[in-house]
Image: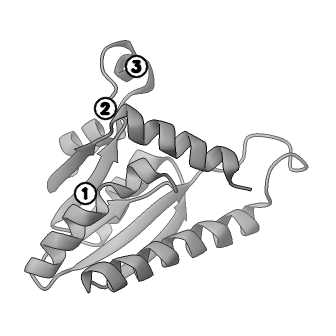
Amino acid sequence: MAHILVPLDGSILAERALPWAATVARATAGHITLVQAISYPTMPADVVQPVDELEVATSDYLKDQAARVQRTYGVTADVVTTFGATASVILAEASARDVDYIAMSTHARDGLGRAVLGSVGARAARVAGTGVFVACGRSRDRARSREAHSHAG
């Protein structure tokens, strides 16, 4: 029974890890936990969505993804939303829930992009103490993700 943690951020790119996670969970009669870190707004309150609305929207998104995983793969998925830095939230949830694997996507940055921005996937692989599956993004997926976000809201 594999327990797989899948960090999501609302993007198509992040969702690329779901098929692998669901396939492994189904094959092992396991389950999935979907997690999304919520960053505290750094802009004035009148410019950003109120924190409670942000938490509800994030939870609704994860519940929709959990329903899709159940419908498509027949695998159950729990959802967790929590405030904090993405890598820290992923590592804390992986430890607290004693997961067997973390399945996540990466923007596949290299060179200067990785040096400047870092890599949540690379940090998880170094620190997690569990297996980490990383689905690499492609420029086509990043473009679709940006387009989806520009039309949302």
Choose the circle earlier in sequence order: 1 or 3. 1
Choose the circle earlier in sequence order: 2 or 3. 2
The quarter of the displayed image where residue 98 is located = bottom left
What amino acid is found at the position of numbered circle 3 in the picture?
A: Gly
Task: Name the residue beneath numbered marker 2.
Answer: 108
Q: Position of residue 113 (x, y in %)?
A: 40, 19
User: What numbered label is drawn on residue 113?
Assistant: 3
Choose the circle earlier in sequence order: 1 or 2. 1
What amino acid is found at the position of numbered circle 1 in the picture?
A: Ala
Looking at the image, which is closer to me, 13 or 126? 13
CB-based contact (under 8 Å), mark 1 and mark 3? no
Task: Name the residue beneath numbered marker 1.
Answer: 103
Residue mark closest to the camera, 2 vs 3: 2
What amino acid is found at the position of numbered circle 2 in the picture?
A: Ala
Relative to residue 10, is residue 76 depicted above or below? below
Q: Position of residue 44 (x, y in %)?
A: 86, 43
Q: Position of residue 55 (x, y in %)?
A: 65, 67
